Image (cartoon, rainbow, N blue to C red):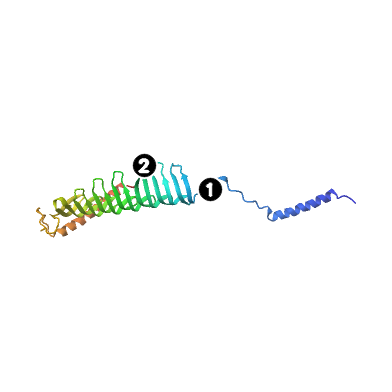
Amino acid sequence: SMPPTRGGSGGHKANSHGSNASQISEGSFIEAPKPDPLWKTWDAKAQKHGEHATVFHTNGDKYRGQYEGNMRHGAGTLLFKNGDKYEGEFQGGLQHGFGTHWVNKKGKLRMQYRGGFGFGKRQGQGILAYQDGGKYEGEWMAGKRDGQGKMIYIDGSVYEGMWKEGSRHGPGTLFLPNGDIFQGEYAFDLKDGPGTFFYVTKNKRYDGVWSKDMGKCGLYGTIEQEGDDGNSGLPQLTLLEPMVVLEEEAYTLQDRREIEHTRELGDSGYGGLNSTE
């Protein structure tokens, strides 16, 4: 018998290759997906979500706590480069919720603020200890005393009342170290409007109207006590329907102060909410 010819063997191989080519052309030529670039792999590993051990930031701060979407979110502790410390809640990378802030004083931490935060600023109820020894307890808005609050000053004075953008504003009571008391209206940190000044040590009182911390008109009398006949022993101002006059003057002065303050803000371009106390 004759051995297989070279051409016959070659023809069989050609048909075999042709069959494979047909199979490959039907889908085997689809390329496998390429692996992600190395930088994408590193970036995915760097994304932080959930609980994390201490993370060192390039600015020198250190954070240990929860993350969401690669941002501080949830409970955590932030150690600042200067030694200060915040422990509490975060949202979107900022202090938000309830927390406590300590300041570093010669290597020792002293609690500065404890209370509510809103996107990095004091907000809601909180207590702040000032560096000079003063203390405020009350409501905050955008980093400023705003709402009902109590301020203890280093001279012993105590103010309880309303605040607006960091200033005493609205009804309030000021207790002085010598025992005297002022109870009345404030506007931008000054007595402004109707009020009563009690000279406790002298057993006297002055009911009047103030403008920019100055008494404009009013009535002197004694502080009413049990068995007191009400005689002040001081000359009294004679006014026609005095309380009506005082009330009208108070509203006039209050409107005037609001207009002046609005004009001052307009001239300076200062909005008052971007700065902190």
- Residue located at (27% from left, 52% from top): 150
Horizontal placement of 111 versus 72: left or right? left
The residue singled out by tag 2 in the image is 108
Estimate the x, y position of residue 237 in percent, counting from the top left. Answer: 11, 54
Query: Which residue is most to the right?
Result: 1
Asked which secondary structure carries label 2, the reply is strand
**Viewer-proximal residue, 38 or 87?**
87
Horizontal placement of 139 versus 173: left or right? right
Pointer 2 local density, CA inside 10 Å: few below 14, some 14–19, many at least 20: few
Pointer 1 local density, CA inside 10 Å: few below 14, some 14–19, many at least 20: few
Q: Earlier in the sequence, mark 2 or mark 1?
A: 1
**Viewer-proximal residue, 189 or 45?**
45
Label 2 amino acid?
Lys
Give how far apart the Cα atoms at labels 2 and 1 are: 36 Å
Name above or below for residue 81 compared with residue 9: above
**Viewer-proximal residue, 259 or 13?**
13
Estimate the x, y position of residue 226 in percent, counting from the top left. Answer: 14, 59
Label 1 amino acid?
Lys
Query: Which residue is most to the top?
Result: 106
Asked which secondary structure carries label 1, the reply is helix
Residue 246 can be seen in this image? yes
Estimate the x, y position of residue 115 in percent, counting from the top left. Answer: 35, 52
Estimate the x, y position of residue 51 in percent, counting from the top left. Answer: 48, 51
The residue singled out by tag 1 in the image is 45
Say if mark 2 contacts mark 1, CB within 8 Å: no
Q: In front: mark 2 or mark 1?
A: 2
**Viewer-proximal residue, 121 or 210?**
121
